[in-house]
């Protein structure tokens, strides 16, 4: 097992406090031979930049780090498992938490080294604890595509949900990111959420990043 991580999410809504701990682990991670060699080269480049005396060029380090991160996502096959529980309390933040919902999911990702389209498969099972209602559990299956080239980053996702009571829902979403400049990205998305309503949701916005050129160790 690789990259075992733990996380906690919280929210506060009127008199209700939510607490959701979870874990994520990569069961399998494989690189092609060419991708592994490229990854080692990018890592060596970053180490070399970090070892250059007392003056550190942050822009060069950031670019090398981005190149390493990009190389780590190429020629890659990953099988990932995750699980989480959701607790709610109306008495206080961590007092009398009722963990009333749980879920597990499995992701399978394949990103070819020389092809700009990546594939993702999803299987997820969620259930309500301590209940026998007809919609107490749901099984999701889905798939996604991601296209990355030059300034464009496009993705599409489809999820099919079936509940134990026989209800059936679907989710279909598209998203696009376009890098206007090095630090400004135009983002947009449109899709139908999983619910009993035929709703269409669309979003448009910007992501802005700031950087500094150099840092000196005196």
Image (tube, grey):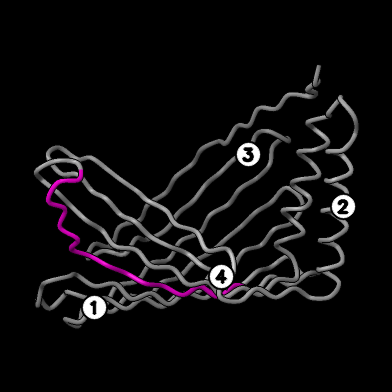
Q: In terms of depth relative to the viewer, which is nearer, 5 or 200?
A: 5
**Nearest-to-viewer mark from 3 and 4:** 4
Residue 53: percent from left, percent from top: 90, 29
Label the magenta part by its dominant secondary structure: strand
Q: Is residue 217 magenta?
A: no
What separation in Å lies between label 2 and label 4 (alpha carbons)?
Answer: 24 Å
**Residue 206 in the figure: left or right of residue 105:** right
Residue 81: percent from left, percent from top: 47, 72
Label 4 Cα neighbours within 10 Å, binned few <14 / some 14-19 / many ≥20 = some
**Residue 33 in the figure: left or right of residue 16:** right
The dot on residue 44 is: 2
CB of mark 3 within 8 Å of CB of mark 1?
no
Q: In terms of depth relative to the viewer, which is nearer, 83 or 177?
A: 83
**What residue is drawn where x is 43% and y is 62%?**
23
| Badge 4 element | strand
Residue indicated by mark 1: 163
Residue 151: percent from left, percent from top: 73, 47
Residue indicated by mark 4: 26
Looking at the rendering, which quadrant does residue 216 occupy?
A: top right
Q: Is residue 108 magenta?
A: yes
Which corner quadrant holds the C terminus? top right
Residue 138: percent from left, percent from top: 27, 76
- First in residue order: circle 2 vs circle 3: 2
Note whether 197 is above or below 179 in the view shown: below
**Nearest-to-viewer mark from 3 and 1:** 1
The dot on residue 185 is: 3
Instruction: State which region is magenta.
Output: 94-109
| Badge 2 element | helix
């Amino acid at each position: 097992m690789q990259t075992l991580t733990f996380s906690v999410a919280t929210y506060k809504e009127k008199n209700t406090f939510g607490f959701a701990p979870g874990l994520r682990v990569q069961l399998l991670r494989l690189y092609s031979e060419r991708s592994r060699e490229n990854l080692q080269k990018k890592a060596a480049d970053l180490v070399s930049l970090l070892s250059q005396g007392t003056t550190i060029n942050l822009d060069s380090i950031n670019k090398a780090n981005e190149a390493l991160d990009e190389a780590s996502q190429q020629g890659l096959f990953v099988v990932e498992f995750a699980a989480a529980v959701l607790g709610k309390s109306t008495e206080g933040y961590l007092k009398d938490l009722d963990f009333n919902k749980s879920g597990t999911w499995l992701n399978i990702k394949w990103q070819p080294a020389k092809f700009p389209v990546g594939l993702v498969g999803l299987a997820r099972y969620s259930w309500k604890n301590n209940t026998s209602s007809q919609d107490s559990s749901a099984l999701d299956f889905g798939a996604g595509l991601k296209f990355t080239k030059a300034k464009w980053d496009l993705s599409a996702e489809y999820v099919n949900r079936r509940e134990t009571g026989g209800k059936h829902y679907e989710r279909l979403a598209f998203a696009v990111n376009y890098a206007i400049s090095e630090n400004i990205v135009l983002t947009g998305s449109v899709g139908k959420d999983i619910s009993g309503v035929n709703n269409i949701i669309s979003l448009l916005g910007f992501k802005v990043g700031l950087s500094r050129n150099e840092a000196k160790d005196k």
